[in-house]
Amino acid sequence: MQRLSDIAVTNQSTLVCDLRIWKHADSEVWIALTGAEDAVGTRLARMLEEASIQRLDDFGGVCETFLCRGEEYLASPRRTASGAGVFSFTPKKRVLAEASDMARSARAAGYSLMILTLQKDGKFGKVWVLCTALRHFTGGPLTYYEDTNTIIDDLKSSPEGPKIVAVHVLAPQFAHMTSQRADRVVSQLEYQNEVLLQS
């Protein structure tokens, strides 16, 4: 594990932050997964298992709905049920500028891991990373909340599709773009009701 500032961030990598031990922006809690598909998948699957992850939440349009207010990351967001991780496509520029704030807010909400892909599609994109991990994942079925219909459809039509429960969270502005293969479709409010602890 390293500090985020010490990692050479490239598009051919996946960044993982262990939020369970995150204390501040300089915490040595980050790792960049690089290399062959099997190596990345094996390592990520072990990290998911060690953190007892049963649920992954996309950021934009999904968990940002309670982690952020406008462009601001909340210091004390609402708490989410345990056993969850954030799984987000975050472009390189935004990673360097915002990943520490994302980690602080996600940890405060009760997330255990944060996984950031620097590409949305193709090699080291969201579906590629998730499929490589699912091939080696021995935990129970993962539930994945995502607001991009094409990512869910690509994931569910892959050989690893049956290993994950994919829930399409409909962002209001994209309500017309519903996934064809999602296991379920929910509104942002329904998603929050499912994952947040009731105060």
Image (cartoon, grey):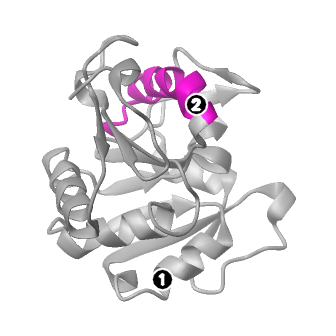
Q: Nearer the viewer, residue 192 or 177?
A: 177
Residue 58: x and y in percent read: 53, 51
The image shows residue 33, relative to residue 3, as above or below, that is below
Q: Is residue 77 magenta?
A: no
Look at mark 2 in the image and give the residue it sits on.
67
Q: Is residue 102 magenta?
A: yes
User: Could you tell me which quadrant the N terminus lies in?
Assistant: top left
Residue 11: x and y in percent read: 49, 49
The image shows residue 178, relative to residue 125, as above or below, that is below
Whether residue 186 is visible here, answered yes or no, is yes
Look at mark 1 in the image and give the residue it sits on.
156
Instruction: Tally the marks.
Output: 2
- 188 with respect to 98 (left or right): right
Question: In the image, what residue occupies the spot 29% across and 15% down?
Answer: 27
Q: Main secondary structure of the magenta part?
A: helix
Numbered label attached to residue 190: none
Determine which quarter of the picture holds residue 90.
top right
Whether residue 77 is visible here, answered yes or no, is no
Dots 2, 1 in contact, CB < 8 A: no
Residue type, numbered disc 1: Lys
Q: Nearer the viewer, residue 81 or 41?
A: 41
- Front disc: 2 or 1: 1
- 65 with respect to 55 (left or right): right
Residue 154: x and y in percent read: 54, 80
Question: In the image, what residue occupies the spot 56% across and 74% down?
Answer: 152
Q: Which residues are magenta?
A: 93-113
Secondary structure beneath dot 1 equals helix
